[in-house]
């Protein structure tokens, strides 16, 4: 509570938080504006029968379930980021730009992500509208109406991407993550209301088990997110002019979950992509598109297959994202330049290899934990025959992780201001 009071005492920090809250309110307002020609009952049935689009609805903040102009959420932007990060592995030149050019390289990478978001949003909007028409969730659209809706949905995705980047600039958490967070939390009151109205005394043991699971997930996410392996680092004594530097011992903190919630988001984007592709194929052949769509839906609606693929993708993306964002060679190089070394290891390549080995080992536990939390609702549903949480394990994991990250960023700004006050 003291920290919360401090936040609102600092004028600059208070202004930033109020602006971010306003931007999130704008997102929620626009998420309630639907496109025309929607049959709410058929739309509800469609989302109840398709768990993949149920996930996408969570990430769009419920904007998808009422066919809002922001129905795609940040999905096209996330998909664009995945594609570019995969291209970084195929084309080393891209990786060099990203790492060696520093902030300028990352700005180029972000600019390419924005450009790629537009065609992906068009493709996803067209594919999803075709899917809804084929499922009779919305009526037939004329070519002009279809083009207008695709353009409006694409504009909504681009606007949401801009809002996310605008939020990130205020350094009160990651913008895209906060938008997803706001979307998930916005569905919580309705979910709790539904849970209360459908309360059945006979199902009390199930409610107790799910409450315990929810607390365990929150505690587990906090524990793994905060968990780190501390590698001891010593600094050699150096004399510069009349002063002596170094001769101290410190440590290098390696997080157990370097990738955060990104692997979960990436995995869901990849799982959704085949269905969008199946709909986009209708440009060339409607019959083949319907067959492909029914096959993809049947394949991924199998709970066992879906859970297995989802778990594997989360683990793969945890390693992939860690490899992209964490560079052991760069860490070893910085240590060497600052006169630091890990006791018992020579600076340079041996240090880099040791750090890479440690990161690979601890990432395994972080990745398995993320995968387990992601499929936890499916496991409980298969074991007990009922849904697990008002918001699923994946959503709960994202909410907790984003809250922790936002809290850290706010706390670091408070600490900075305290130091400025002292000196």
Image (cartoon, rainbow, N blue to C red):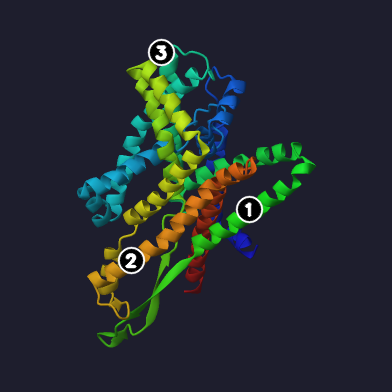
Say above or below: 41 vs 358: above
Callout 1: few (<14), some (14-19), or many (20+) C-alpha neighbours within 10 Å?
A: some
Compared across the picture, whether 346 is left or right of 5 comes to left
Q: Looking at the image, is mark 1 or mark 2 earlier in the sequence? A: 1
Question: Quick check: marks 1 and 3 in contact, CB under 8 Å?
Answer: no
Say above or below: 1 vs 339: above
Q: Quadrant of residue 124?
A: top left
Quick one: 212 or 116, which is closer to the camera? 212
Residue 334 appears in the picture as rendered: no
Foreground disc of the pair 2, 3: 2
Q: Which mark is residue 213?
A: 1
What residue does disc 2 label?
Answer: 357
Say above or below: 90 vs 31: below
Compared across the picture, whether 166 is left or right of 40 comes to left
Distance from Cα at disc 1 to Cα at disc 3: 49 Å
Q: Which mark is residue 143?
A: 3
Q: Which mark is residue 51?
A: none
Distance from Cα at disc 1 to Cα at disc 2: 33 Å
SS for callout 3? helix
């Amino acid at each position: 509570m003291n920290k919360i009071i401090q936040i609102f005492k600092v004028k600059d920090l208070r202004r930033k938080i109020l602006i971010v809250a306003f931007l999130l309110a704008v997102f929620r307002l626009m998420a309630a504006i639907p496109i025309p020609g929607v049959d709410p009952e058929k739309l509800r049935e469609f989302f109840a029968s398709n768990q993949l689009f149920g996930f996408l609805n969570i990430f769009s903040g419920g904007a998808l379930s009422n066919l809002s102009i922001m129905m795609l959420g940040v999905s096209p932007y996330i998909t664009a980021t995945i594609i570019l990060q995969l291209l970084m592995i195929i084309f080393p030149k891209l990786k060099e730009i990203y790492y060696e050019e520093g902030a300028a390289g990352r700005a180029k990478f972000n600019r390419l992500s924005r450009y790629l978001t537009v065609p992906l949003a068009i493709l996803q909007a067209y594919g999803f509208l075709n899917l809804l028409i084929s499922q009779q969730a919305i009526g037939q659209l004329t070519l002009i109406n279809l083009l207008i809706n695709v353009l409006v949905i694409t504009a909504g995705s681009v606007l949401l991407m801009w809002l996310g980047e605008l939020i990130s600039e205020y350094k009160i958490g990651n913008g895209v993550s906060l938008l997803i967070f706001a979307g998930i939390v916005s569905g919580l009151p309705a979910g709790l209301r539904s849970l209360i109205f459908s309360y059945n005394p006979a199902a009390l043991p199930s409610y107790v088990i799910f409450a315990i699971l929810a607390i365990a997930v929150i505690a587990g996410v906090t524990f793994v997110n905060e968990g780190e392996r501390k590698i001891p680092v010593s600094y050699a004594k150096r004399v510069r002019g009349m002063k002596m530097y170094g001769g101290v011992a410190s440590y290098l903190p390696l997080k157990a979950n370097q990738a955060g919630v990104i692997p979960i988001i990436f995995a869901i984007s990849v799982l959704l992509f085949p269905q969008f592709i199946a709909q986009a194929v209708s440009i060339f052949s409607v019959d083949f598109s319907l067959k492909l769509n029914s096959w993809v839906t049947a394949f991924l609606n199998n709970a066992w297959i879906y859970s297995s693929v989802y778990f594997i993708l989360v683990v793969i993306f945890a390693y992939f994202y860690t490899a992209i964002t964490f560079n052991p060679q760069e860490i070893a190089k910085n240590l060497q330049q600052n006169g630091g070394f890990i006791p018992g290891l020579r600076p340079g390549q041996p240090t880099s290899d040791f750090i890479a080995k440690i990161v690979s080992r601890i990432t395994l536990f972080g990745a398995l934990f993320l995968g387990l939390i992601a499929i936890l609702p499916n496991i409980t549903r298969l074991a007990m025959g009922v849904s697990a949480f008002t918001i699923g394990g994946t959503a709960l994991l994202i909410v907790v992780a984003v809250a922790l990250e936002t809290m850290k960023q706010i706390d670091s700004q408070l600490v900075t201001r305290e130091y400025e006050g002292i000196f």
